[in-house]
């Protein structure tokens, strides 16, 4: 940006010279018709040299003052101003016009001082300088228009790429969503780095330049942080797919989450992803306890999401599977108030039910009603409005023989309706735009658990499903 500003600045002293000289030539021609200068027309038939000479003197004097130490002596600053903020902004019409106009008019005092002794030299320089000053406006307007047109096109292209490859930023630490993360460059946190007045393809900081255009570039490699909690993140502009898990206490929600994540990580999505890893350090020990057969109930208070980061060379950015394991007490109605920030941007929902508990149909229906009421309240959604994200009804303990074991899809849906869950099935299909049904053994890393999430991603129009096997 410094180079661009320098080019704009220096050309601002050169480009207006051509029209300024022509207008000065016409001006001095006009003076030859005004007394007392009109006597020259009586002395000489050829007035051309008398018009051209002052214009040439004015042009040369203007350039000498502009690009020599004499200009600094006269109070004109030729160098571009030092940056007062970072990223270095495009100077454009506002900055350059104000500065250059003040510089050119600083010649006024010298015109007065030398008006008598050096009038034949100073006056033409003054005339050319004043005309050139006013000729700056169209020049800088054209420069600004060109820059902002290119910037707007680049910004539009960048926005389309970002929506397709990232969509939004979800902080893995505070779980609040933002349009974009903050990018940490030379100690500065730049919110939502993108083409702007600070640069179209790169932004310039104190000691280095950083890419700011396109998901296909190296911008995603810049250190990032959450703009709301300032926590450093390693999401690398990955596209998040957020699944919130609901269900009665001890219905198998936590086991379901670990079943999905464990299966995806251990198989890299059955080989569909180049790599798959748990995002948080604390998720490793939790997964080890799950694999050892220990699965502690999730507290009712808000918990950070479990996340798997999936990389694939076929995709421009990585994919991030967020699974929010909400404590079962939240769905009993005994907790008056709680905060589940992910409900504002959840891409899909999984409702888990345990058919082996006491009165399973009643327990599941009650938990569903509390969950739905909380979800609608959080999003200020009327009861008559159909929720436009997909829901998967997941039946756990599929390893235990029973009428619901080993079924999925329409067959499981009909079996649920015939075995006391008709009200739940009816309510789910009334409240959500798309509903699917799965059963799995959540105590093991189950392909059917992964299949439920894969179906949710397909119903939500997300491409992360191709990396889940």
Image: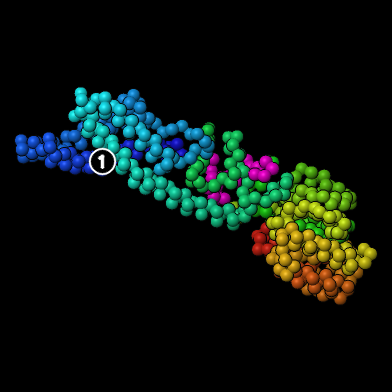
Q: Determine whether 112 is above or below 157 in the image.
A: above
Residue 76, x across and y down, in percent? 35, 29
Residue drawn at the location 86% of the way across and 48% of the way down:
289
Q: Is residue 215 magenta?
A: yes
Q: Is 359 part of what is drawn in magenta? A: no
> Closer to the camera, 270 or 72?
72
Q: Residue furthest front?
A: 35
Magenta-tinted stretch: 210-230
Q: Quadrant of residue 79?
A: top left
In-image side of 19 versus 313 (left or right): left
Residue at the (60%, 34%) spot, across then down: 187
Mark 1 secondary-structure assignment = helix
Residue sitting nearer the eye, 332 or 2: 332
Can you see residue 315?
no
The location of residue 386, given as percent across then percent down, is 71, 68
Residue at the disc numbered 1:
20
Q: Which color scheme does this rendered protein use?
A: rainbow
The reply to whether residue 438 is visible in this rendering is yes
Q: Position of residue 309 (x, y in %)?
A: 70, 50
- Horizontally, residue 82 falls left or right of residue 129, namely right
């Amino acid at each position: 940006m410094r180079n661009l500003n320098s080019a704009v600045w220096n050309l601002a002293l050169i480009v207006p010279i051509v029209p300024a000289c022509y207008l000065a030539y016409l001006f001095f021609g006009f003076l030859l018709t005004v007394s007392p200068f009109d006597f020259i027309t009586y002395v000489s038939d050829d007035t051309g040299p008398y018009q051209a000479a002052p214009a040439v003197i004015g042009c040369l004097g203007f350039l000498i003052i502009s690009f020599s130490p004499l200009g600094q002596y006269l109070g004109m600053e030729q160098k571009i101003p030092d940056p007062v903020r970072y990223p270095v902004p495009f100077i454009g019409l506002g900055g350059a016009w104000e500065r250059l106009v003040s510089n050119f008019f600083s010649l006024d005092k010298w015109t007065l001082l030398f008006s008598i002794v050096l009038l034949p030299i100073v006056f033409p320089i003054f005339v050319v300088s004043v005309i050139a000053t006013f000729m700056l406006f169209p020049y800088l307007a054209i420069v600004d228009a060109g820059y902002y047109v290119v910037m707007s096109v680049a910004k539009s292209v960048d926005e389309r790429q970002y929506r397709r490859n990232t969509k939004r930023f979800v902080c893995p630490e505070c779980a609040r969503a933002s349009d974009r993360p903050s990018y940490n460059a030379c100690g500065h946190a730049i919110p939502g780095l993108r083409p702007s007045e600070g640069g179209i393809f790169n932004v310039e900081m104190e000691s280095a330049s950083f890419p700011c255009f396109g998901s296909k570039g190296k911008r995603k490699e810049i250190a990032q942080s959450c703009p709301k909690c300032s926590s450093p993140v390693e999401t690398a502009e990955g596209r998040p797919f957020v699944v919130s898990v609901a269900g009665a206490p001890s219905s198998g929600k936590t086991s379901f989450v670990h079943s999905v994540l464990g299966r995806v990580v251990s198989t890299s999505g059955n080989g569909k992803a180049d790599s798959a890893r748990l995002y948080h350090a604390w998720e490793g020990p939790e997964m080890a306890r799950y694999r050892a057969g220990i699965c502690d109930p999730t507290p009712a208070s808000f918990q950070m999401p479990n996340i798997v980061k999936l990389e694939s060379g076929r995709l421009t950015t990585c994919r991030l599977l967020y699974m929010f394991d909400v404590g079962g007490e939240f769905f009993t109605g005994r907790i008056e108030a709680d905060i589940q920030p992910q409900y504002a941007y959840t891409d899909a929902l999984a409702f888990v039910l345990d058919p082996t508990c006491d009165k399973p149909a009643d327990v599941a229906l009650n938990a569903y009603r509390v969950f739905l009421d909380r979800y609608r309240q959080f999003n200020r959604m009327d009861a008559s409005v159909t929720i436009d994200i997909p829901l998967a009804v997941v039946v756990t303990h599929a390893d235990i023989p029973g009428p619901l074991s080993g079924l999925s899809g329409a067959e499981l849906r009909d079996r649920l309706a015939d075995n006391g869950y008709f009200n739940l099935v009816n309510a789910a299909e009334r409240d959500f735009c798309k509903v699917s049904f799965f059963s799995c053994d959540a105590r093991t890393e189950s392909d059917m658990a992964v299949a439920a999430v894969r179906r949710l991603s397909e119903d939500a129009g997300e491409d992360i499903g191709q990396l889940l096997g």
